[in-house]
Image (cartoon, rainbow, N blue to C red):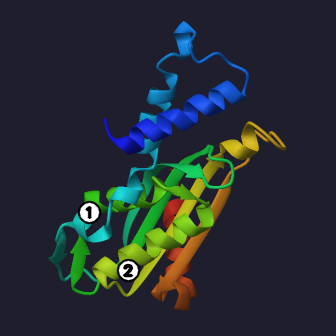
Amino acid sequence: MSKLLEDLAGHYRAIIDGLGEDTNREGLQDTPMRAAKAMQFLTRGYQQNLGDLVNNAVFESAMDEMVVVQDIELYSMCEHHILPFIGKCHIAYIPQGRVLGLSKFARIVDMYARRLQIQENLTRQIAEAVESVTDAKGVAVVIEARHMCMMMRGVEKQNSIMKTSVMLGQFRKSQATRTEFLQLVGNRG
């Protein structure tokens, strides 16, 4: 067991004790370690980097029209309250001689989502990562998510959804390109 994991478990034990619970009772005895392991998993994006993740899965292609990858599940943790936000990510890019392996889009989303985040920054990080590895003419990212910090505490609004978008290159310059993308990800029929 790593020192980091032991330290995290100790912090969780202190938090649980601080709440007035007894960490020695049967149901909570192993909770600090389970919580520490869960947090390591939920923030594993800190141990990843874009180069290793993409692993040369960029391929030559004559494709020069919009490519859209839609409804990529995402799970992240709000950096303000350390509560989950859950949603989906839509990514489009316009290749110029190189395409990215399909699974890498989901891996890029996960790498950045599995860090303490705010949705606005997450959207930009994904867009800039796709742009950097593909050298695309344009990249668009839209994220739609439900935030537990808004649903479980504070205003307690159960049906609120936050949507963010980042448009780079052709998606920013061309209203027609941006509209085509938004229509594609907006139509669910």
- The residue sitting at the bottom extreme is 173
**Residue 121, image x and y in percent?**
57, 68
Q: Is residue 9 left or right of residue 62?
A: right
**Residue 112, image x and y in percent?**
44, 61
**Residue 188, image x and y in percent?**
52, 52
Q: Which circle, 1 or 2, is nearer the viewer? A: 1
Front residue of 122/39: it is 39
Which type of secondary structure does the marked residue at label 1 adopt?
helix
C-alpha separation, residue under disc 1 versus residue under disc 2: 15 Å
Q: Is residue 132 above or below residue 77?
A: below
Front residue of 3/89: it is 3
> Callout 1 environment at 10 Å: few (<14), some (14 to 19), or many (20+)?
few
Q: Is residue 146 above or below residue 48?
A: above
Which type of secondary structure does the marked residue at label 2 adopt?
helix
- Which residue does the image show at 42% across and 84% down from the upper left? 138
Q: Which residue is mark 1?
A: 53
User: Can the viewer see residue 136 in this picture?
Assistant: yes
Q: Amino acid at mark 1?
A: Leu
Q: Quadrant of residue 17?
A: top right
Number of labels in the image equals 2
- Which residue does the image show at 73% across and 40% down from the upper left? 151
* Quadrant in the picture for the N terminus: top left
Asked if marks 1 and 2 touch (Cβ < 8 Å), the reply is no
Q: Which residue is mark 2?
A: 131
User: Can the viewer see residue 159 in this picture?
Assistant: no
* Marking on residue 162: none
Q: Is residue 187 left or right of residue 2?
A: right
Q: Is residue 184 left or right of residue 150?
A: left
Q: Amino acid at mark 2?
A: Glu
